[in-house]
Image: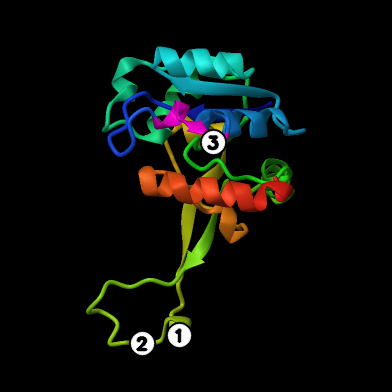
């Protein structure tokens, strides 16, 4: 079985209350919940939180809610720790889709496209992202950007991993797939400026969502 988990804790330093902040008429987290519920390959959808307001919002949009231990709601808690805790308590799931609520822009087929790719060759895990060509100033001697080899940057939109990886608290296995997605879906919200950018992109590309 496949589960979509949306990790959403209540404490946010960069943009307080961002997970339930209104974005084009609905809470930010609702965009990820609706994407997961519209997937044909996801069996169940859970929001993982310790916050009562996020819990109420998630339930109102049709997601299940898993109340994470308070120790996994701190600034130091990692996503893989949250996922490990979840899968040890819900062992019926063998495939996990992680949807960061702060990356709300997904076209209608993205989740299922990722799952199909993940299952096609038994990859250990999958992450969406793009190839980034950046170097720290002072290290590149004014080399042209197009001459950089670059590296794959995971954008936080979608991660897929097996339950075995999660149980062992392993974020990336030995046979990952790097899934390049359209640039407009790469944006992640950390602060007010990001929020404004994402809102603009949603308006521009709403016909593709």
Question: In the image, is residue 19 part of the stretch drawn in magenta?
Answer: yes
As helix, strand or loop, the secondary structure at mark 1 comes to helix
Q: Which residue corresponds to the image point at 33% horizontal and 23% vertical from the top-left?
A: 73
Residue 156 visible here: no
Q: Which residue corresponds to the image point at 59% horizontal and 14% vertical from the top-left?
A: 60
Residue 196: give x, y in percent of width and height: 45, 47
Question: What distance separates the C-alpha of mark 2 from that of mark 3?
Answer: 37 Å
User: Which tag, 2 or 3, sits closer to the chain's start?
Assistant: 3
Question: What distance separates the C-alpha of mark 3 from that of mark 1?
Answer: 33 Å
User: Which disc is residue 165 wearing?
Assistant: none
The quarter of the picture where residue 184 lies is bottom right
Question: What distance separates the C-alpha of mark 1 from that of mark 2?
Answer: 7 Å
Q: Which residue corresponds to the image point at 70% horizontal and 30% vertical from the top-left?
A: 42
- Contact between labelled residues 2 and 1, with CB atoms less than 8 Å apart: yes
Q: Which residue is mark 3?
A: 98
Its colouring scheme is rainbow
- Contact between labelled residues 1 and 3, with CB atoms less than 8 Å apart: no
User: Which disc is residue 147 wearing?
Assistant: 1
As helix, strand or loop, the secondary structure at mark 3 comes to strand
Q: Which residue is mark 2?
A: 143
The residue carrying pointer 2 sits among few (fewer than 14), some (14 to 19) or many (20 or more) residues within 10 Å by Cα, namely few
Q: Seen from this angle, which residue lies furthest left?
A: 138
Q: Locate the C terminus by quadrant.
A: top right
Q: Which residue corresponds to the image point at 41% horizontal and 32% vertical from the top-left?
A: 18
**Magenta residues, start to end:** 18-24
């Amino acid at each position: 079985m496949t589960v979509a988990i949306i990790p959403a804790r209540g404490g946010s330093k960069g943009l307080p209350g961002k997970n339930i902040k209104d974005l084009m008429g609905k809470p930010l987290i609702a965009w990820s919940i609706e994407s997961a519920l519209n997937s044909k390959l996801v069996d169940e959808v859970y929001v993982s939180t310790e916050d009562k307001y996020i819990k109420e919002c998630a339930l109102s949009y049709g997601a299940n809610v898993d109340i994470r231990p308070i120790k996994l709601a701190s600034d130091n808690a990692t996503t893989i720790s949250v996922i490990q805790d979840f899968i040890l308590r819900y062992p019926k799931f063998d495939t996990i889709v992680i949807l960061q609520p702060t990356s709300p822009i997904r076209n209608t087929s993205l989740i299922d496209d990722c799952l199909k790719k993940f299952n096609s060759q038994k990859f250990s895990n999958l992450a969406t992202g793009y190839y980034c060509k950046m170097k720290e100033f002072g290290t590149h001697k004014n080399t042209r950007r197009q001459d950089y080899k670059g590296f794959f940057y995971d954008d936080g939109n979608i991660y897929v991993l097996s339950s075995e990886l999660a149980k062992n608290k392993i974020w990336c296995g030995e046979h990952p797939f790097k899934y390049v997605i359209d640039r407009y879906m790469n944006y992640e919200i950390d602060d007010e400026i990001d929020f404004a950018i994402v809102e603009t992109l949603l308006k521009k590309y709403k016909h593709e969502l």
